Amino acid sequence: MKQIDSLWQEVRDLSLGNATAIRRLDSPPAPLEFLRDFVSLNKPCLISGAATAHWPAAALWRDRAHLTRALSSSSVTVHLTPNGRADSLVPIDGGSASSSPPPPALCFASAHAQRVPFAEALDMISRSSRESNFVAYAQQQNDCFRSEYGPLARDCDGHVPWASEALGSLPEAVNLWIGNHFSETSFHKDHYENLYAVVTGEKHFLLLPPTDVHRMYIEDYPAAQYSYIKETGEFKLEVEEPIKYVPWCGVYPYPSPENLESEMAKFPLYFNGPKPFECTVKAGEILYLPSMWFHYVKQTPDDTGLTIAVNYWYDMQFDMKYAYFNFLQSIEYQPIHDYMGTEEESEDL
C-alpha cells in the first residue's frame, strides 16, 4: 500500500526532519518545553551540557574499587550469553526427527541469569569475550537500581526532575546497566518514556519511529532459554515447554559484508527505506527515548573497560497515540512493488 510507504517519509518531513541525527539540547529543557516539544510529539532528543555532571557517579563509578566497596555485601543479577546478544533471535539447534510439525528455524533466546556477589559479577563482565565462552552483562530490568544496587543510590539522582515534572509522576522503574563492547541489544520497543543516562563509556543507538513498524519484520518466535554449564563452559539452549511465542523483530542492522546481500534480500523494507536515526550518548548525557520507538543498542567502554548507564522508565500514556500505533500494526502490509494485482487494483492501494 503506497500510503504506508509514504507514511515513513511523511513522518520525517512533518515532525522529525530528514537528517539521520536527532536534535541535541545544550542544557536540560524546562519541563513545559520538554512536554510540548518532545513528549507530546513522541520525538527523541539528546541532552548534553552537564545533564548529569553534578552526579558523584560521574567520577566515582570510573573507580572499580569504589563500586566493589559500596556493593561489598550485595548480590546482583548477571546475564550470560555466548555472543553478547541477549533477548534476540538465534537458530534452534537440531530438534527431534519425529517432531511434528518441525521446529522453526529461529527462536527468541533469553539469557542465562544468575545472582552472584557484585565483585564476581564485575569480574565476569570484565573477562567477557567471545573467546572466553560467554559474555556477561548486568541488564536486569526490574527496577534493579533501587533494589540490587541500592548502596549506589546516593551517587546519582533518584529521578530526572524536569522529566518528572513534565510527565507528572516519578519513574516506575530505575535500572542499572554494566557491560562491555560485546554487549548488544536487538531491535525492540518499550511501552515507557525512557530517560537513558550514560555515566561511563558510550551507548550507540539506532532509532526508528513507531510508524516504521512494518519495516521491522515482526513475527512470532518460540521462546527459548539459555543455560550455562560452568564446569564445561558450554551453553545449552532449550525451547520452553509448553511452547509460548514472543513477537520480535527479525532485522539485524549490522550484517557482515558477506551476508549483506542476503540480509537486504530478506529485509528490503528496512535496508532500502529511510535510514534509522543514529545517536551516540556519551558520558554525562541523557537520551530521551520516546515510548514505542524501536531501538538497537551497542556500546563502547571507557578506558576501564566498562560502560555503565542508568535509565529511568516513566509510564507512558495509553492514549490516541497508542491506539493509532495498534491500528497501524494490525494492518497486513504488502509492499506495492510485490503486489501482484492488476494495474487498476494497484492504483487503488
Image (cartoon, grey):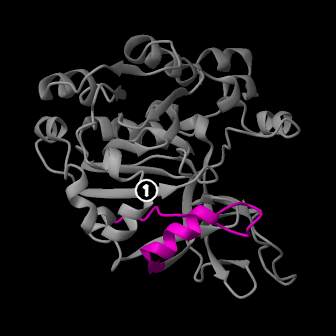
Does the segment drawn in magenta span residue 135? yes
Q: Locate residue 200, reporting x and y percent.
A: 43, 45
Dot 1: few (<14), some (14–19), or many (≥20) neighbours within 10 Å?
Answer: many
Between residue 257 and residue 283, name the one nearer to us: 283
Q: Quadrant of the C terminus?
A: top right
Q: Locate residue 263, reporting x and y percent.
A: 78, 39
Q: Residue at x 48, y 63 (%)?
A: 138
Side of 140 where 124 appears, left or right: right
Relative to 214, residue 276 above or below: above
Q: Residue at x 72, y 15 (%)?
A: 343
Residue topped by disc 1? 177
Q: Amino acid at mark 1?
A: Trp
Side of 178 where 26 appears, left or right: left
Between residue 138 and residue 337, name the one nearer to us: 138
Q: Which residues are magenta?
A: 115-142
Side of 115 where 55 appears, left or right: left
Q: Locate residue 318, reporting x and y percent.
A: 25, 45
